[in-house]
Amino acid sequence: MRTLRIGTRGSLLARWQAESIRKRLFAATGVEPEIVIIKTSGDKMLHAPVAQIGSKGIFIKELEEALTGETIDLAVHSVKDIPTDVPSRLMFPAVCKRDDVRDCLVGSTLANLRQGARVGTSSLRRQAQLRHLRRDLDLRDLRGNVDTRLRKVESGEYEAVAVSKAGLDRLGFSQRISEVLSPEVCMPAVGQGAIAVECRLHDREAEDLLTPLDDPETRAAVIAERALLGALHGGCQVPMGAWARVERGELVMDACVCSVDGAQCVKQRAAAPPEQAAQLGEHMARLLIEAGAQSILEEAGRQRA
């Protein structure tokens, strides 16, 4: 059996995710995979707003090029970073069991933030939903790795930052969390909390090794959420959240679209059998549009143009 090369971004969180896959593969096969660090466009422009540099695949483009160029055999991604269009020569044999989907605040709880408090987040989705709850907050675009964002709170530059709870949990920073935001308060990003592993389409050896890492319930949820994202032609800079999960054998999905200023927020819920995950996502898109999401998305598009 050949030694597999696992490609990953170089951030602390990305390396943790790649290492978790390496350990699982080693435990299953006894073969020690090699981790290869690859710098992506998103890593090279960590201080520019995502909306400015173009969000589509900025954290995975170079990893996919390394896969197709055969300098790596596997690529480990946060599902929320993966564009809805996957290159035809690549596939995802493993969507691993999802961790916590929720967002959280570090530095302060939402209720304890003073009027006009400065809050940082890299996500337009989080900004829009937090504005919907607290129009008085001074929400700022804040990029950088997780440890960098936490230091911004420690230094007093921001009174709080909003980040993914799963990322803090993985890095051992759970004790830093001031408040966990329920999906009713802040709907997660599509794919948040899930890790997927990509390989070349006809690499049967890699596919066979990865298949046992796949979690069918997480895959169904991710398919539904990404189908919604695709139907609404959204990227990671659309103020939209979605959360699908299997409850009592049924795939249940909540989703929302918020205006950038937080004034409007459209929410819907729907359910379907897990094997109809893609249809559920498309149905949810229609429900949101019928409820008024189209004008919100068009306005968000004009603001980014």
Image (cartoon, rainbow, N blue to C red):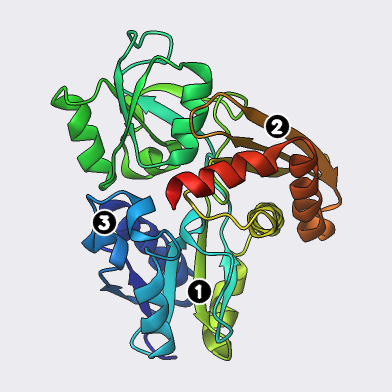
Q: Residue furthest right?
A: 273
When asked about the image quadrant of residue 92, the answer is bottom right
Q: Is residue 245 left or right of residue 39?
A: right
Task: Kindly give the residue lying farthest to the left in the view shown.
Answer: 155
Which structural element holds mark 2?
strand
Q: Three-letter amino acid code at disc 3?
A: Ser
Q: Residue at x 83, y 43 (%)?
A: 271
Residue 267's label in the rendered image is 2
Specify whether residue 241 is in view: no
Question: Residue 116, percent across and down?
Answer: 32, 13
Mark 3 surroundings within 10 Å by alpha-carbon count, few (fewer than 14), some (14 through 19), many (20 or more): some
Disc on the earlier residue, 2 or 1:
1
Residue tagged 1: 198
Quadrant into which the N terminus falls = bottom left
Please tell me whether residue 23 is drawn above or below residue 63 in the rendered image. Answer: above
Q: Nearer the viewer, mark 3 or mark 2?
A: 2
| Mark pair 2, 1: CA separation | 32 Å
- Horizontal relation, residue 244 to residue 49: left or right: right
Q: Earlier in the sequence, mark 3 or mark 2?
A: 3
- Residue 33 lies, with reference to residue 215, above or below; the image says below
The amino acid at mark 2 is Lys
